[in-house]
Image (cartoon, rainbow, N blue to C red):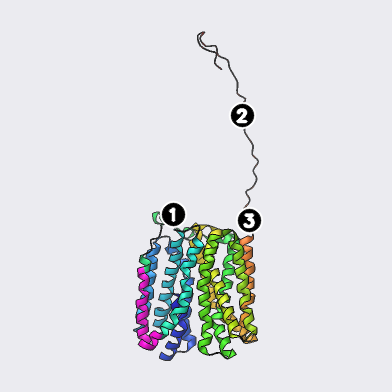
Amino acid sequence: MAGIQGSVGIIHTELVSETSYSLSVIGWIGSLMIGLCTMSSPFISILTKFIPCRILAITGSLLMSLGFLCAAFTSSVPVLFLCLGILPGIGMNLISFSSIMILRGYFLKILPLAYGMCLAGVGVGMVSFPPFYVYLHVTFGLQGSFLIVSAICMNSVVFSGLTIPTRTQSQKKSMEKGLSLGDLFDFSLFKSYTFVMFVTGHLIFNIAYAVPFTYLPIKGEETGFSEQSSALFITVLGAGSSVGRILFGWMSGKFPLIRKKAFLVVMVLSTLSLLPVSFTSSYSLIMVCSTIFGACAGIIHTEIPSFLIGLIGIDNLPNGLSVAYLQQGIGSLVGIPIAEAVCRRVGDNAAFGFTTVVCALVLVLFTLSLYLPERKPQTPKVPHILPEVPKPEVFVVTMAETGPTAA
């Protein structure tokens, strides 16, 4: 999934050369795919209450495969919006959301490590798939590459079928009785100010996260590096993401007492990591900064489910995660336009300063949400009046002479 998303820019370039539409129109294909991959989470969360996660993941895999299969036989851009944007976007969310839900049924103590290993594929896909897709396009053309990607997506059907999800108590209740909207989504989550601060921080972080993918290659080319060399900044960002997810997931399970503090240290590193890029022309330094930011961003995304469990409980994870993923989609959609507006006024180097400022705000919100105590509603004090209890009376009864005296 991450590999396909990482290849969106290549697909856009191909479609612009094949059609008469500009990049401003074709670009909506990738926006729909990446946006729906997270913004459809509230709907997916409701489905998990009725449908086993394995079935949802298989359905998502089929939607991805169907989308690329149909795209191979059409040149209509509105149809391509459906085939390459909407269907894969919803399909990817069905897979990713189901994977998180399945893991929570099997792991507790090492759940952060399980999440890290599960989501490490994001970085691997970002690094490996785009060059492979370029090879497919050069060798088989646009339609041929779509057909092969469709076949590759069918492998997710097999992997999804191998999962054995546990049925949660809430899912059993949902299947036993009809539910209202309030039962399908727990709106009381928004009464928790720590939860609201946490998901708001997640939204703002994704605004910053979207920026380096566009402006790191621009910085490289403006500095005088080749297009291929500048593209490596994104490659090492993805590699750092994979390594960071697994290592921090292992550390979280091994040393749970320092997990919050370590997470905030990672947030500090992500805040400072890209700031030197604005002031340097050193290729090696930009590579190091990209790697550190990728590792920190991968850790932050991986730890979101684990910290949500701590804030709202494991039974509320589907609702909480759907809100967090919705925020992630919104942040991904508006991040680049906001950064572009800033750069038009100040210059392209301002993008990295913008990322630093935004991450600093996220650091404040995460710190408050993880360390502030949640205020619980106080129950009114009711005077406790005990009823008067009559004192017991003792009677001495004389029994038969052969028996003892009884009280």
Query: If the image is split into quadrants, where does the N terminus sit?
Result: bottom left
Look at the image and give the residue range highlighted in magenta.
Answer: 135-158
Query: From the viewer's perspective, is 147 left or right of 42?
Result: left
Q: Position of residue 187 (x, y in %)?
A: 53, 60
Which residue is located at x 53 percent, y 70 percent? 244
* Amino acid at circle 1: Gln
Give the residue number, with chain letter if any, for mark 3: 375
Q: Where is residue 333 in the image (x, y as percent from the top left)?
A: 53, 77
| Residue at the top extreme of this rendering | 401
Dominant SS of magenta comes to helix
Separation of residues labelled 1 and 2 (CA atoms): 45 Å
Q: What element carries label 2?
A: loop
Q: Which of marks 1 and 2 is nearer the N terminus?
A: 1
Q: Is residue 363 visible?
A: yes
Query: If the image is split into quadrants, where does the C terminus sit?
Result: top right
> Badge 1: how crowded within 10 Å, few (<14), some, or many (20+)?
few
Give the residue number, with chain letter if any, for mark 1: 169
* In this view, 377 is above or below 287: above
* Amino acid at circle 2: Val
Q: Position of residue 5 (x, y in %)?
A: 46, 78
Q: Earlier in the sequence, mark 3 or mark 1?
A: 1
Separation of residues labelled 3 and 1 (CA atoms): 28 Å
Q: Nearer the viewer, residue 405 or 239?
A: 239
The quarter of the picture where residue 271 lies is bottom right
Give the residue number, with chain letter if any, for mark 2: 389
Q: Is mark 1 on a helix, strand or loop?
A: helix
